[in-house]
Amino acid sequence: MLREDRTLVFVEVKLRRGTGFGDPLEAVDRRKQEGLRLLTEQYLAEKDPDYDEVRFDVVGILERRDGRRLRHVRHAF
């Protein structure tokens, strides 16, 4: 979790060492998103942090022989 001004930002990071199982960003499907939302609700209820809004970002890292590709999707879901 990060803060950006008065926004709490929850970030899911996915790493793949190839595309045999798809792009890293594809791993954050609806089921994964729902799980992250539930965990976030539990965290917010327990910690009661001071914030105005919540945002979910996803970072996908693809490592290949020719280098590394990083994609950051703000407001992913």
Image (tube, rainbow, N blue to C red):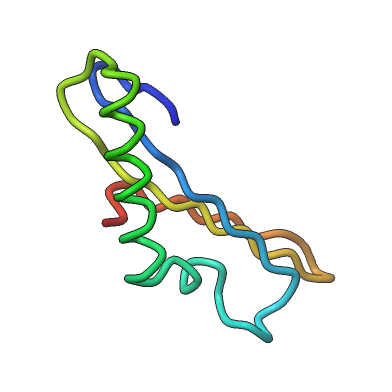
Q: Is residue 33 above or below residue 54?
A: below
Residue at horizontal 26 percent and vertical 56 percent from the top = 77
Q: Position of residue 31 (x, y in %)?
A: 36, 70
Q: Residue furthest left?
A: 52
Report the front residue among 66 and 23: 23
Q: Is residue 20 above or below residue 39?
A: below
Q: Residue furthest right?
A: 65
Q: Is residue 65 above or below residue 48?
A: below
Q: Position of residue 10 (x, y in %)?
A: 39, 38
Quarter containing the N terminus: top left
Q: Is residue 70 left or right of residue 38?
A: right
Q: Quadrant of residue 18?
A: bottom right
Residue at horizontal 57 percent and vertical 81 percent from the top = 22
Report the front residue among 55 and 67: 55
Q: Is residue 28 left or right of residue 60?
A: left
Q: Position of residue 61 (x, y in %)?
A: 62, 58
Residue at horizontal 48 percent and vertical 67 percent from the top = 25
Residue at horizontal 44 percent and vertical 66 percent from the top = 28
Q: How many marks?
A: 0
Q: Residue furthest bottom?
A: 20
Report the front residue among 67 and 77: 77
Q: Quadrant of residue 54?
A: top left
Q: Is residue 2 above or below residue 19?
A: above
Q: Is residue 10 left or right of residue 21?
A: left
